[in-house]
Image (cartoon, coloured by chain):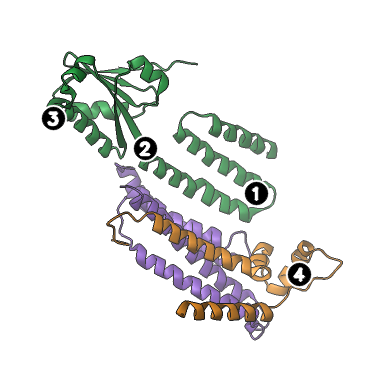
Chain colours: A orange, B green, C purple
Amino acid sequence: MRRRVLAVLMCIVCFVVIIASNKVPTSDDLPIATYITKNAFAETGASNAVTATYLFYRYYDTLFEALMLLFSIIAVIYMSIHEGDKYDE
Amino acid sequence: MLEIALILLLITSVAAIQTRYLRHAVIYLGLFSLAIAFVYLLYHAPDVAIAEAVIGSTIATILYLVALQKYKIFTIYYRLQDEEIGDSTYLSHSKQDLIKVLEKFCTKQELEAQIIYSKETIEAIKANHQYALIIEEIKGVVRITVHPENYKLDALTAFLENERRFKHAYAILPVEEDLL
Amino acid sequence: MNDHSQLNARTLPIVFPMILIFGFYVIVNGHVSPGGGFQGGAILASVFIAKYLGNPIKTLNLYKVQNIEKVLLLFLFVLMTGFVTLSIHMILHGSLIFYIILANILIGLKVACGFTIIFYRFVFYESR
């Protein structure tokens, strides 16, 4: 029951976030790479366009990459527990 | 400059595949990571170059080395003579002592001992199986045949000299590496 | 690494502060120079690897490190959704630079925790 409530809550939060999130304005004459390299400094203030990209234009990528790292760590811990071990000692 | 780095990439990648020693392959892979980080730098992608240099060349190399050291199966063939099988003396106390000493050596070196009793001749074992050591006992002398790629030979010699419980007379016969 | 050498144990601690400073430099200057959270975090994690090479004793409580990592990830979620989707950054002079530096620091510390956990689990627990 609690899990279902949590799942529904997560879905609602995701929906709200997707609806409310800002969109990168794309003009038709410029491809997205040119747009980013041209306007990154003016819009975010970061002169390193890569940082501006992964923290502003494509922040979902960064967020779920961090989540993936956490999952892989959980997998490593789970695989390296042997019989009779405590979690950490 | 770029051409040199690209040629280095080719050389290290082919060497990493073609080498016979896993440890050398790991080192070649680290060199490959360093070279490809340089190539990224020359292609004006310094972010990727930093990530590659740190992760590929440091962390992955050390993880591979640790894994190689942890999981190493040390295969020991015990070749039985016909009379040993006949009166089943190979289960006797002194013979089991020899096995125990070798297992202790393996535990000390963080290897996993795998002991196989066999009736085949030494030449057949050499030709057909993966082995690290072949042991046989002929008239009270233990003859230890060592695989040519075995880099634990010096450690084994030192261990057997220092081990007090090991009372057998023994002879170590390293096999010359044949160039096929 | 079974029998660690005195040379490693004596000289590696000299290098620790430099690696730490370099890692934090890469993290904090991620918005003006090449680098960023992920790369800096990996450099910070290599401090612990150097510590292991010098003196292979486990003194770190991995359970706490993992909890720290989870809390950092939660902060990252809150920061990203709050700042970017709800446009709070428009209040702060319309500049995103504060958000970018903060997110870089959070990502860097999180990645450092993650790599440290992976390495220490491999080294100390993956043997029988």
Locate residue C67 relative to residue B39 in the image: left or right: left
Q: Which residue is mark 4?
A: A39
Q: Residues within 10 Å of mark 1 (few under 14, many from 20)?
A: some
Residue kind at label 4, given as amino acid type: Asn
Q: Residues within 10 Å of mark 4 (few under 14, many from 20)?
A: few
* Callouts 1 and 4 on one subunit: no
Q: Chain of mark 3?
A: B
Badge 3 element: loop
Q: Which residue is mark 3?
A: B165
Residue kind at label 2, given as amino acid type: Lys
User: In which image quadrant can residue C1 be found?
Assistant: top left
Q: Which residue is mark 1?
A: B41
Residue kind at label 1, given as amino acid type: Leu
Instruction: Decide if residue C16 is in sight here.
Output: no
Q: Which residue is mark 2?
A: B72
From this view, report whether residue A16 is shown above or below residue C8. Answer: below
- Circles 3 and 2, Cβ within 8 Å, touching? The answer is no
